[in-house]
Image: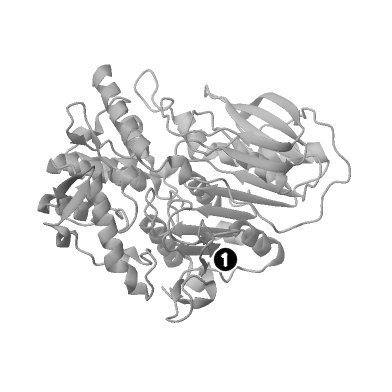
Amino acid sequence: MSQERRDRRARRLTGLLAAAVPLVAVIPLAASASTQLAPAQATTPACTSVPVTAPQGAKIESVQAERHEGGTLSFPATELSPATVITDVPAYCEISVTVTHLGADDHVKVGITLPDTGWTGRLQGIGGSAYAAGNFGAPLVQAVKDGYVGVTTDAGVLSGLDTSWAVTADGTVDQALLSDFASRSVHESAVIGKDVVRRHYQRAVSYSYWNGCSTGGRQGYEEAQDFPADFDGILANAPAVNWTQFAVATLWPQTVMNNDHHFVSNCVLGAFQKAAIQACDPRDGVTNGIIDRPDECGYDPRSLVGTTVLCDGREITVTTADADVMRKIWNGPTDERGRSLWAGLPKGADYTWLAGTAPGPDGALTAPGFPVAVQWVQAFLEKQPGFDTAQLTYAQYRDLFGQSVREYDRVIGTSDPDLSAFRRSGGKLITFVGTADQLIPPGGTLAYRAQVEQRMGDAERVNDFYRLFLAPGVQHCGGGAGAQPTNELGALVNWVEHGTAPVTLAATTLDGSASRDLCPLPQVSRYQGYGDPALASSYRCTRF
């Protein structure tokens, strides 16, 4: 593909995403916990660099220390995080450790924030988003405010929507950096973080926690699967588990539109979304703009054919071709025999990121595709950063789906259902997924949970250490019309430190107008048929 053509595609993608809900609006700050523990240090240690023991196979390149006064701290918006202001932050010491690995030309940064006062003895690992392995901004400072030592890493790679690091000059994937991003850097950040704590405070961490969503959720599951002793508790929401399937499955809407030679306007896509909600919302006994169980929604998009949609001041008639594309997107990718390969976009979820369209240079609609999926195919499967995913045929798409699993599942798949070592270590895992998740369809997490139950016993036995909560109407990591958890990290802390497993997670809508208690599988939250639908007391836990 020529540079000019790549630039045109980039401009079309930028135009689409500018009209979409910003990604920063669907990947919020890490959750905070209100559960208190007595301060662990009586005096303020000096903020100086400390000797750090290199993890096995690694070498410490540098250690730097910088003291911050705290107070009110502001963080500008980035491509993956909103502008944030955090008040009443205690003074803290930030220690940065740079690591390299034998035989690899990598330079991995680990950041550790250590509060001068109010440290509870807890450590909190901070997860990443998309292709970012961590977050050195507001979440690290929020951890300090909440009494934690915060730890994060950049895995030696670039920002969240940049995979230029992946392909080397000879056209092969940089396996060292991929390993850093997939698993190694998070494990080593936990090891290094605990070592720095011992040297800085002259005492060990009391409890260690992981806090992540999306990529951060996948990282949490990776830790539970392969490094079960790193964290006592793992909060891993909307996790990108089964990465090798998810990262190709979310390219499916683009593939459908290009192969069917039919690009559905955003106005019509929005009409299908609205119609599905209207049709299936009442099924749960209350009309609140939420589809509690999108997988049980039988709405057929063909019922909208022939109706008109007002779009930018003109009327558009919904066609059979529109409905066929929408049906395929909702059903998800299939093999050559029509068998499901992966879950599709949930009915009622926002379509913009996965299926949104944008005008091309000639004014005709195009489907730019989900950036995370586009970049996975370009960099890791085709090994060509300029590869045009819009040219994929159905057959080529299905081949790439299989290639992704074969080539990378052992590296970044995060698909191992054997969590027995994590259970033996005493670890606890909490996850919530929104039923309206528009970036990582919840079907992947539900399938993984089912595999864990099959491997390790029934739902009740698995719930002894791993609880998965469905959040009806909630989007990716939060947002949407549904009620999202208000203190799931606090619930995890209470489970780890006091043995009190969460029977429910308290949740409220973003505007505070409604509350609901979320239930761990195999139960889900259901309206009981009477009472104010905006109050949690009107819902009960019933079998999934």
**As drawn, 128 above or below 483:** above
The percent position of residue 191, horizontal first and vertical second, equals 66, 40
| Image side of residue 41 versus residue 279, left or right | right
The quadrant of the image that shows the C terminus is bottom left
The percent position of residue 515, horizontal first and vertical second, equals 53, 67
> Picture quarter containing residue 21?
top left
Q: Residues within 10 Å of mark 1 (few under 14, many from 20)?
A: some
Say which residue appears at 45% left-offset and 61% top-offset: 482
Hey, what amino acid is under mark 1?
Ala
**As drawn, 144 above or below 496:** above
The percent position of residue 154, horizontal first and vertical second, equals 55, 32
In this view of the protein, can residue 334 be seen by the observer?
no
| Image side of residue 469 versus residue 393, left or right | right
User: Exactly how many numbered labels are in the figure?
Assistant: 1
**As drawn, 59 above or below 247:** above
The percent position of residue 84, horizontal first and vertical second, equals 59, 39
Say which residue appears at 77% left-offset and 27% top-offset: 49
Residue on which the image places disc 1: 506
Residue situated in front as seen by the camera: 210 or 526: 526
